[in-house]
DNA sequence: TGAGCGTACGCCCCG
DNA sequence: CGTACGCTCA
């Protein structure tokens, strides 16, 4: 037990040992937050003799949950089992809802729709309402629906313009989900809240079970998550929350930094612990991070420091092309590995998942082992979606989205018109999907009726095979008997698709061995759940490899050396930034990225980049300029070098000089329109027009910001003065 | 009514 | 460059 506290400083120890009552730990980046959390749980189990099952620990990602479980197990040695309630909010909710599904009138095997599925559904609803998808963009409507749900907005008050449309689509969308025993990610939380509110006895069960509740990354919880926590706690006050406002990066999904203040109000007798000392990074890195984050106006001042000395300077590298950038990263890694570093010591961080591609290509070429975290692209591949949809349909017959997909893979001569008739008929008669098919002859006509019934016969046949065949044989039967494999024969990506399907099959087979005590239907249910809820970890079998991940996914992790790549305006910060708030969120993301590095930080970009098939000249990320130049050394073709531009440029080893020259000489380099930035000469009283908010009047201009009053429903907005969306009238 | 083909359009993060 | 949708033809 003494071991447990030995490696902690005084503040950390305090956070571990203050087990009773509400505790708020403000934990700066690298302040040993995970150690505190795991030590606290281990301390509760070993010292306070708390039953592991009576501890609830909520993490933000599945990866964090997994890591925490492992560390607790290590800390408590072999004597105690790790708590089974270490999970994300969503995973916890699924567990509760499967158990008490009857309390909210859902079937036990309800299905969870992922983002793509919900987008499809929103599209379908927009079409159903005969709305113009050009005017009402499905993506945006979906975003607004999500906002209604996470912010608990009252749709009755939505009575102007587009809001009426959104409210209508929302109602339809929600109806479809409920009628078909489907949930989106927000529903998992909302329905758990509903379950607890409707069934006090069930809520009480959990209040009594969980004696100790711990929540990580509290600054990124949203309103419904807060509500849920309150319900689970009830009268219980043993709540431990950890947070850092500077690392709040999930506003886009409803995260509310205000939840920390709310906590203080709701639990006025809270005990606060400040973890300020950083144990991770050199002071060069911390200075850069501090400097960047102080540009944010909305924050509590805080300064990270460590005892690690200054360390190496931050390297800023600008390649001519994006290929140069990638080659440089690869070269740096290889050089260092030759001098004794491990591939594990490096991480490549990017703003968007698609950036991983070019790194994958070059790493493969140069035999640099890597793994990619948190990329769901494998499960989003068409063929994998098709197969999982088959599995869903075999288990859950009422799902319109899935039915639509499977009935056309392969094509069976059933199209949109027939399906619309079928679904309308189903709705009218309140039939289940399969019952609707069996009785729809009058509604859809004889030909379509036969086709639909043949299809349902097939699915029913598959269902009967589930209990008798191994997963391996089961999947083979589905792929062959459905004609799916045959339909791929003219596909030029046939080999890759089949390879992917086989990979998925192997995954199922492996899981089959784990869940031996469950019915096969349950195993399938768990697997589908996992596919939806958890993101893949590609190439996880690599023992020593470079980690590639998004800046978001990097939160909570650390590496000896970190490359933040594609540091260009429009990529990072993203071109979607419109308001000062948006920009501050991007800046926090930069702060998170910078503070992942222990010893050395690289910021890289390229002078020209190909997007949408066009080659553009890029502009450096403003975050580079926010770092004190004394902390930086410049490498490569760079606008910062003392002899600006091409005079100082020398082709980098391993690149193709001919290609570079061609790029520079030929007249194919189009000036990028500086993304979304332009000089706007705005003054108080000016009339302006905004692409999203319409006409407005400038109320004030302060530095790079301006306040503009728009017509209802937009009202007064604080925007970036030089944003392209603004035009002076 | 469904499927195939051509055109238009898009830079996201997570559970 | 890639995909998703709309139009046209069978």
Image: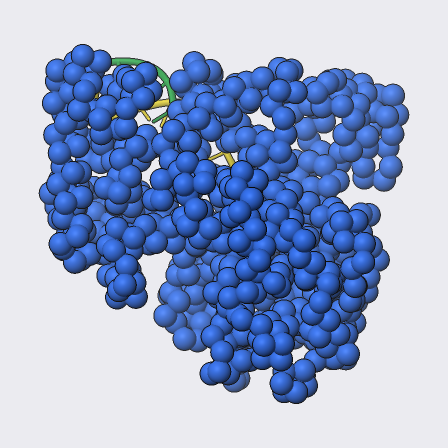
Chain colours: A blue, B yellow, C green
Say which residue appears at 52% left-offset and 42% top-offset: A199
How many numbered marks does the figure carry? Answer: 0
Quadrant for the C terminus of chain A in the image: top right
Q: Is residue A429 above or below residue A344?
A: above
Say which residue appears at 39% left-offset and 67% top-offset: A540
Q: Is residue A386 above or below residue A296?
A: above
Residue lying furthest front:
A201
Q: Is residue A399 above or below residue A451?
A: below
Q: Nearer the viewer, residue A91 or A570?
A: A91
From the top left corner, tell me how far across and down residue A446 is, in percent: 12, 15
Whether residue A387 is visible here, answered yes or no, is yes
Q: Nearer the viewer, residue A676 or A278?
A: A278
Q: Quadrant of residue A630?
A: bottom right
Q: Is residue A388 left or right of residue A246?
A: left
Q: Is residue A522 above or below residue A458?
A: below
Q: Is residue A337 left or right of residue A597?
A: left
From the top left corner, tell me how far across and down residue A419 is, in percent: 27, 22
Whether residue A688 is visible here, answered yes or no, is no
Say which residue appears at 14% left-offset and 27% top-offset: A453
From the top left corner, tell me how far across and down residue A637 is, in percent: 62, 59
Say which residue appears at 43% left-offset and 23% top-offset: A125
Q: Quadrant of residue A1?
A: bottom right
From the top left corner, tell me how far across and down residue A110 is, in percent: 37, 41
């Amino acid at each position: 037990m003494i071991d447990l506290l030995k490696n902690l400083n005084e503040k950390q120890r305090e956070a571990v040992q203050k087990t009773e009552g509400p505790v708020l730990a403000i934990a700066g980046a690298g302040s040993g937050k995970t150690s505190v959390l795991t030590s606290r749980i281990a301390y509760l189990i070993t010292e306070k003799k708390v039953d592991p099952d009576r501890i609830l620990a909520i993490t933000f990602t599945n990866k964090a949950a997994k890591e925490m479980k492992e560390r607790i197990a290590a800390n408590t040695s072999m004597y105690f089992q790790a708590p089974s309630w270490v999970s994300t909010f969503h995973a916890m909710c699924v567990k509760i809802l499967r158990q008490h599904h009857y309390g909210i009138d859902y079937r036990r095997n309800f299905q969870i729709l992922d983002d793509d599925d919900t987008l499809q559904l929103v599209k379908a609803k927009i079409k159903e309402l005969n709305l113009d998808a050009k005017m009402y963009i499905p993506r945006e409507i979906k975003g607004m629906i999500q906002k209604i749900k996470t912010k608990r907005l009252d749709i009755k008050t939505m009575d102007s313009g587009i809001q009426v449309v959104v409210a209508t689509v929302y109602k339809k969308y929600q109806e479809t989900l409920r009628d078909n025993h489907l949930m989106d990610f927000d529903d998992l939380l909302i329905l758990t809240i509903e379950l607890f509110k409707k069934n006090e006895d069930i809520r009480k069960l959990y209040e009594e079970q969980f004696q100790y509740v711990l929540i990580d990354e509290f600054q990124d919880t949203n309103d419904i998550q807060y509500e849920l926590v309150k319900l689970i706690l009830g009268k219980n006050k043993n709540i431990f929350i950890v947070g850092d406002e500077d690392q709040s990066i999930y506003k886009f999904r409803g995260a509310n930094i205000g939840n920390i203040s709310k906590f203080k109000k709701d639990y006025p007798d809270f005990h606060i612990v400040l973890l300020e000392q950083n144990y991770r990074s050199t002071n060069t890195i911390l200075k850069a991070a501090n400097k960047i984050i102080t540009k944010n106006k909305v924050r509590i001042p805080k300064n990270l420091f460590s005892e690690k000395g200054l360390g190496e300077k931050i390297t800023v590298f600008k390649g001519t092309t994006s290929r140069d950038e990638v080659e440089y990263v690869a070269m740096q890694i290889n050089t260092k590995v030759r001098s004794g570093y491990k591939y594990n010591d490096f991480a490549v961080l990017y703003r968007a998942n698609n950036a991983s591609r070019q790194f994958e290509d070059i790493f493969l070429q140069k035999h640099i082992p890597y793994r990619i975290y948190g990329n769901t692209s494998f499960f989003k591949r068409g063929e994998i979606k098709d197969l999982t949809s088959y599995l869903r349909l075999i288990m859950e017959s009422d799902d319109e989205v899935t039915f639509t997909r499977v009935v056309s893979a392969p094509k069976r001569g059933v199209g949109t018109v027939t399906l619309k008739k079928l679904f309308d008929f189903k709705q009218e008669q309140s039939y289940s999907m399969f019952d609707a098919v069996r009785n729809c002859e009058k509604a859809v006509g004889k030909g379509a009726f036969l086709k639909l019934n043949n299809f349902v016969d097939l699915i029913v046949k598959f269902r009967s095979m589930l209990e008798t065949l191994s997963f391996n044989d089961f999947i083979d039967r589905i792929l062959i008997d459905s004609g799916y494999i045959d339909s791929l024969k003219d596909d030029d990506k046939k080999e890759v698709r089949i390879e992917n399907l086989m990979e998925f099959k192997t995954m199922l087979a492996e899981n089959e061995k784990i869940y031996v005590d469950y019915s096969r239907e349950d195993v399938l249910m768990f697997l589908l759940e996992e596919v939806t809820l958890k993101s893949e970890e590609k190439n996880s079998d690599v023992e020593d490899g470079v980690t590639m991940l998004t800046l978001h996914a990097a939160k909570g992790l650390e590496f000896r050396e970190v490359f933040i790549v594609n540091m260009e305006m429009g990529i990072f910060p993203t071109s979607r930034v419109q308001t000062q708030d948006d920009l501050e969120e991007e800046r926090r993301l930069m702060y998170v990225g910078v503070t992942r590095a222990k010893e050395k930080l690289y910021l890289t970009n390229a002078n020209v980049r190909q997007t949408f098939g066009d080659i553009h000249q890029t502009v450096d990320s403003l975050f580079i300029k926010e770092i004190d130049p004394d902390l930086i050394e410049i490498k490569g073709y760079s606008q910062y070098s003392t002899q600006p531009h091409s005079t100082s440029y020398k082709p980098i080893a391993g690149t193709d000089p001919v290609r570079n020259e061609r790029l520079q000489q030929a007249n194919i380099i189009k000036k990028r329109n500086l993304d979304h930035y332009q000089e706007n000469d705005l003054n108080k009283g000016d009339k302006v027009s905004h692409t999203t908010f319409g006409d407005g009047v400038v109320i004030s201009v302060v530095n790079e910001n301006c306040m503009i009053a728009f017509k209802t429903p937009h009202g007064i907005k604080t925007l970036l003065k030089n944003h392209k969306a603004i035009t002076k009238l």
